[in-house]
Image (cartoon, rainbow, N blue to C red):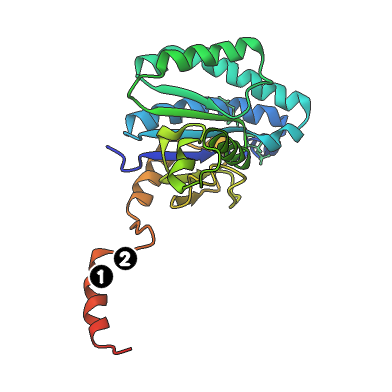
Amino acid sequence: MNSEFKHVAIIMDGNGRWATQRFRPRVWGHVRGSAVVSDIVQAADDLGVGALTLYAFSTENWRRPNEEVSVLFKLLHKFLLKERARLIANQVSFKVIGDTTRLSPATKKLIADLEAETANFNGLKLTFCFSYGSRMELVRAVNRFMEENPGKELKEEDLDHFLMRPETGDVDLLIRTGGEQRVSNFLLWQIAYAELCFTPTKWPDFTVSEFQRILQSVGQRERRFGGLSPKAVTTENKQAQAIHV
Ligand code: FPP
């Protein structure tokens, strides 16, 4: 299958509740969730998705207990060690966006090395949003634009260029697992015309087959980007001629 979704973004929610329901600590949900990340990255690549952007840690997640934050940081580190070779073999172009300053020097180095090594690959564009918030990204973009273009009026296309990973473009499909129906400060600019899919499945239970089903079923929705379908235009033209305003 060659997915028609050039850019899929996922809010991987429900880890904590998944673990609590099983009488395990919340962090167990993140551990299980990180295995799902590996499966979905591979599936996105196999299914011909162009770009996959994953919300791994939000600016708001800093409010969580230190122990939970530290597990999330360790899982990122482990993911990079475990998946590095596979990402390179599959020509995946990897990038982390967000504020990575508080990651350990070792994790920062792993990220920098992998980003440099995969920068020119033309396979799946995989982005991890870590300590990321869309408002922060937008404010940063506007400030950078003003620094580089003093006195110039900002246009929509200018802003795109100053986002943290401009080459991934607009999001075509946003999936949120875990049953909540909100966007939580994630890619607010990029999801302007995205199809939205909210599934009750908690992230550790999310499977490649559900991912595939979502891509297939949402792929059948008609996307009009504020316009009309060609069929509706023909019908509308005929009917409009009969109305005199
Ligand atoms: C939301 O679940 C999920 C997160 C805050 C982190 C997502 C992280 C992973 C999927 C694992 C990390 C993996 C890598 C590779 C970085 P939640 O804890 O808010 O769930 P809840 O709503 O049930 O509490």
Q: CA distance from mark 2 to mark 1?
A: 6 Å
**Circles 2, 1 touching at the beta carbon (< 8 Å):** yes
Quadrant in the rendering for residue 18: top right
Q: Quadrant of the N terminus?
A: top left
In this view, the residue in front, 56 or 193, is: 193
Q: Amino acid at mark 2?
A: Leu
Q: Residue 41 at x, y = what percent?
A: 43, 28
Number of dots carrying numbers: 2
Figure quadrant, ligand 1 = top right
Q: Quadrant of the C terminus?
A: bottom left
Q: Residue 69 at x, y = what percent?
A: 71, 26
Q: Residue 233 at x, y = what percent?
A: 25, 70
Specify whether 98 is left or right of 8. Answer: right
Report if residue 22 is visible in the image.
Answer: no
Residue occupying the point 34% across, 46% down = 216
Residue 113 higher or lower than 173, as above or below = above
Q: Amino acid at mark 1?
A: Val
Residue that carries the numbered disc 2 in the rendered image: 228
Q: Say which label, 2 or 1, has the lower sequence index.
A: 2
Residue that carries the numbered disc 1 in the rendered image: 233
Residue occupying the point 47% across, 39% down = 9
Residue 229 higher or lower than 52, as above or below = below
Secondary structure category for the residue under label 2: loop
Label ID, residue 135: none
Q: Dot 1: within a 10 Å radius of its alpha carbon, few (fewer than 14), some, or many (20 or more) residues?
A: few
